[in-house]
């Protein structure tokens, strides 16, 4: 069985989401379904159908999180000592060579990735381009809006 890597911080964040879904969201949607049922005819009851759809989403997410957390290989990025080499869990400072624009990403497991928080999935094209490189290296990356050239200006593990 292939165990997907996940950072310790990411697993804690996902466990928090799982606890919230089980202790707050699930009971709320069950109450909403019961209340909608009390309104009578279920065929034309929009609240009932919306609540059932929400319940389906919540149960699916709970199952996804439980499965991922039970099989994940949790990696404490503080214990990684890869030096200036980019491996899973690295926080990488990049500079776009044409514009000089700087950006920082952390390479994390697929389920914990969140581009808004600058957490990129280990399976993403940019992470695959970064892994194995060292601080000071330059690389080319095919972004959706064309080819980008980056220099790795910093690599750290927190």
Image (tube, rainbow, N blue to C red):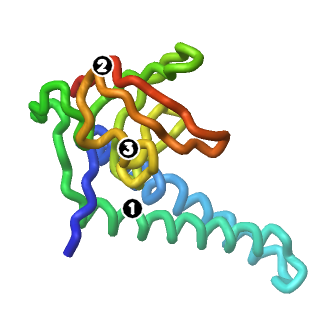
**Would you identify the image quadrant in which residue 47 lies?**
bottom right
Q: What crowding class fits label 1: few (fewer than 14 Cα within 10 Å), some (14-19), or many (20 or more)? A: some
Please name which of the two marks, 1 or 3, marks the residue nearer to the observer: 3
For this rendering, which residue is in front, 40 or 9?
Answer: 9
Q: Which residue is mark 1?
A: 65
Which circle marks residue 154 in the picture? 2
Tell me the quadrant of the picture where the C terminus can be found.
top left
Q: Secondary structure at mark 1?
A: helix
Please name which of the two marks, 2 or 3, marks the residue nearer to the observer: 3
Which circle marks residue 129 in the picture? 3
As measured in the structure, the alpha-carbon distance from the residue carrying label 2 to the one carrying label 3 is 15 Å
For this rendering, which residue is in front, 120 or 141?
Answer: 141
* Number of numbered discs overlaid on the protein picture: 3
Give me the residue at 90% from left, 80% from top.
Answer: 44
Q: Would you place residue 125 above or below residue 29 in this image? A: above
Q: Is residue 31 left or right of residue 66?
A: right
The mark nearer the N terminus, 2 or 3, is 3
**Would you identify the image quadrant in which residue 88 lies?**
top left
As measured in the structure, the alpha-carbon distance from the residue carrying label 1 to the one carrying label 3 is 28 Å
Q: Is residue 8 left or right of residue 126?
A: left
Q: Residue furthest right?
A: 44
Q: What crowding class fits label 2: few (fewer than 14 Cα within 10 Å), some (14-19), or many (20 or more)? A: some
Q: Secondary structure at mark 3?
A: helix
Q: Would you place residue 79 above or below residue 104 in this image? A: below
The mark nearer the N terminus, 1 or 3, is 1
Residue 151 locus on image (x, y percent): 39, 23
Q: Is residue 62 left or right of residue 45?
A: left
């Amino acid at each position: 069985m292939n165990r997907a890597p996940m950072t310790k911080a990411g697993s804690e964040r996902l466990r928090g989401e799982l606890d919230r879904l089980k202790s707050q969201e699930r009971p709320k949607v069950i109450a909403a379904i019961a209340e909608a049922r009390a309104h009578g005819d279920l065929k034309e009851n929009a609240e009932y159908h919306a609540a059932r759809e929400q319940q389906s989403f919540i149960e699916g997410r709970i199952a996804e999180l439980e499965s991922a957390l039970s099989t994940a290989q949790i990696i404490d990025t503080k214990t990684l000592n890869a030096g200036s080499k980019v491996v899973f869990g690295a926080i990488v400072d990049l500079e776009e060579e044409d514009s000089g624009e700087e950006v920082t990403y952390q390479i994390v497991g697929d389920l914990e990735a969140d581009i808004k928080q600058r957490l990129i999935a280990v399976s993403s094209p940019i992470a695959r381009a970064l892994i194995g490189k060292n601080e000071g290296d330059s690389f080319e990356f095919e972004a959706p809006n064309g080819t980008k050239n980056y220099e790795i200006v910093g690599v750290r593990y927190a």
